[in-house]
Image (cartoon, rainbow, N blue to C red):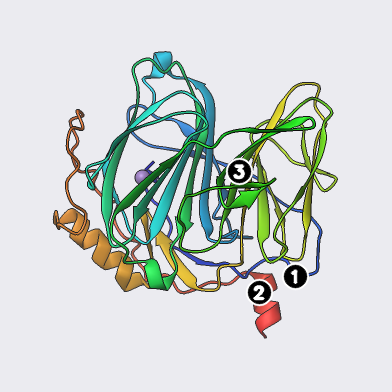
Amino acid sequence: MSNVETDPHETVCHGADGAAAGDHHVEVLEPRDVPLGGPRAMTVRRTLPQRRRSMIGAWCFADHYGPDDVSRTGGMDVPPHPHTGLQTVSWLFTGEVEHRDSLGTHALVRPGELNLMTGGHGIAHSEVSTPGTTTLHGVQLWVALPDSDRDAPRDFQHHAPTPVELEGATVSVFLGSLAGQVSPVRTATPLLGAEVVLQAGARLELAVDPSHEHGVLADTEGVELAGTLLPRAGLGHLPPGVGSLVLANRSGTTARALLLGGPPFEEEIVMWWNFVGRSHEDIERAREEWMAGSDRFGEVQGYAGAVQHLPAPALPAVRIRPRRNASRADRDS
Ligand code: MN
């Protein structure tokens, strides 16, 4: 999906912010509503980035949307738009989205199947919910690429994990390893990505890599992480040093969550609109090249809409200086 805020802020992100290691208190990141523009407007609930925490591992962007009845509103229709320095992870709970990109990929995004697109040096893609989709419900996640891979060529990987039945829960591992499952999908930094469905009243303990920090994105009400109840669409964070995630479902019906993890991302990144770079100049150049129709991004074939090239918003009038949150500033001083 494109970040189609009309006035996106330029965000300097650093993975090593937030609570200090050894503090195993769950930090709850509340979602904020972001209305996406355009005639087929939808509102998403964003938990990353935010002022308090910009990343979890290399995960740098998390939007949760739906369930929305799109049979009346027309659904998702995002014209060709660019990405740099990141990978997009599309994960659906309900509905179906048609993806086309400038690598030549034409794929259907379906519930329970991972689609990981790499927009290292530059890629463009479009996303349209299919005419048969009546309910659209899912997440859009971005992964920042480390310096060694941020100019990587375009790539697209698809993986449909086999759900694993545990006592009271079903786990689908789409990135990394968990519950004896290992995803074959290649990533530039170690990552965990998994969907967990919890039966009513279930409690589940999952061994995880203690060198990772973890996030639990609650798709429904009732999801509890290490004794802390998460709001719907909220993201609970645990710092490195935790060897198991204790999840519970305190609702009377099935609950669902996504598990995200990775070692703290040590590089500072600058994020603006659909671009990840290392400096204001990187962002400025990517925007100019997209607007000029540079072959850095390539062409998306077969998108049927009227807009073939989503224009970038205006850059912020002032150069954004790197900003660090209070806890990191404390630690560094
Ligand atoms: Mn996109």
Q: Hey, what amino acid is under mark 1?
A: Ala
Q: Disc 1 to disc 2, how far (Cα)?
A: 12 Å
Q: Residues within 10 Å of mark 3 (few under 14, many from 20)?
A: many
Disc assigned to residue 328: 2
Lower position in the chain sequence, tag 1 or tag 2:
1
Q: Residue at x 43, y 66 (%)?
A: 270
C-alpha separation, residue under disc 3 versus residue under disc 1 = 23 Å
Say which label, 2 or 3, has the lower sequence index: 3
Q: Position of residue 197 (x, y in %)?
A: 68, 31
Q: Amino acid at mark 3?
A: Ala
- Name the residue located 21 percent from the left edge and 29 percent from the top edge: 305
Q: Position of residue 106 (x, y in %)?
A: 27, 35
Q: Which of the numbered marks, if any, corresponds to residue 137?
A: none
Label 3: which residue? 194
Give the foreground label among 1 and 2: 1
The span from disc 2 to disc 3 (Cα, nearest Å) is 29 Å
Query: Looking at the image, in which quadrant does ligand 1 appear?
Result: top left
Q: Earlier in the sequence, mark 3 or mark 1?
A: 1
| x and y percentages locating residue 78 in the rendered image | 32, 35
Q: Quadrant of the N terminus?
A: top left
For label 1, the residue is 21
Q: Is mark 2 within 8 Å of ligand 1?
A: no
Closer to us: 35 or 96: 96
Q: Which mark's residue is nearer the viewer, 3 or 1?
A: 3
Q: Residues within 10 Å of mark 1 (few under 14, many from 20)?
A: few
Q: Secondary structure at mark 1?
A: loop
Q: Please name the residue shown 28% across and 43% down the image.
A: 125
